[in-house]
Amino acid sequence: MSQIPHLLTIGRIAAEEGETVRRIQYVLSSRQYIQPIAYAGNTRLYNSQSVELIRAALAEIDSRRANREAVPC
């Protein structure tokens, strides 16, 4: 018997990551390689692999932002 995958909505991902929904939406719109695994009506659903990609993208954004702020004027 196969396991049922654990799928998350954008709102659930945002809540679990402590981010705003808008920030998760930005990551998804700017990184076309992160695609939903399924749909429930119009709701996009993401699996754990997609969530890992979102986490990595958020870390990359934060890292670039920190480096930019660390540069003296």
Image (spheres, rainbow, N blue to C red):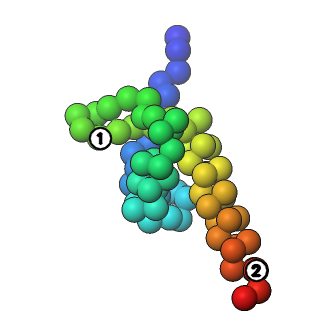
Amino acid type for the residue under numbered disc 1: Thr
Q: Secondary structure at mark 2?
A: loop
- Which residue is most to the front? 73
Q: Quadrant of residue 44?
A: top left
| Quadrant of the frame with the C terminus | bottom right
Residue 40 spot, x, y in % from top left: 28, 33
Is residue 2 or residue 64 the one in the foreground? 64
Is residue 26 or residue 42 the one in the foreground? 26
- Which residue is most to the top? 1
Is residue 37 or residue 15 the one in the foreground? 37
The disc label shown at residue 66, or none: none
62 in relation to 72, above or below = above
Question: Which residue occupies 39% across, 37% down?
Answer: 45
Mark 2 Cα within 10 Å, few/some/many (few <14, many 20+)? Answer: few
Residue 55 spot, x, y in % from top left: 61, 51
Q: Quadrant of residue 25?
A: bottom left
Q: Quadrant of residue 51?
A: top right
Question: Which residue occupies 38% across, 29% down?
Answer: 38
Question: Which residue occupies 66% across, 57% down?
Answer: 60
Residue 4 spot, x, y in % from top left: 47, 24
> Which residue bears the numbered disc 1?
43
Amino acid type for the residue under numbered disc 2: Val
Q: Secondary structure at mark 1?
A: strand
> Which residue bears the numbered disc 2?
71
First in sequence, mark 2 or 1: give its number: 1
Residue 26 spot, x, y in % from top left: 44, 56
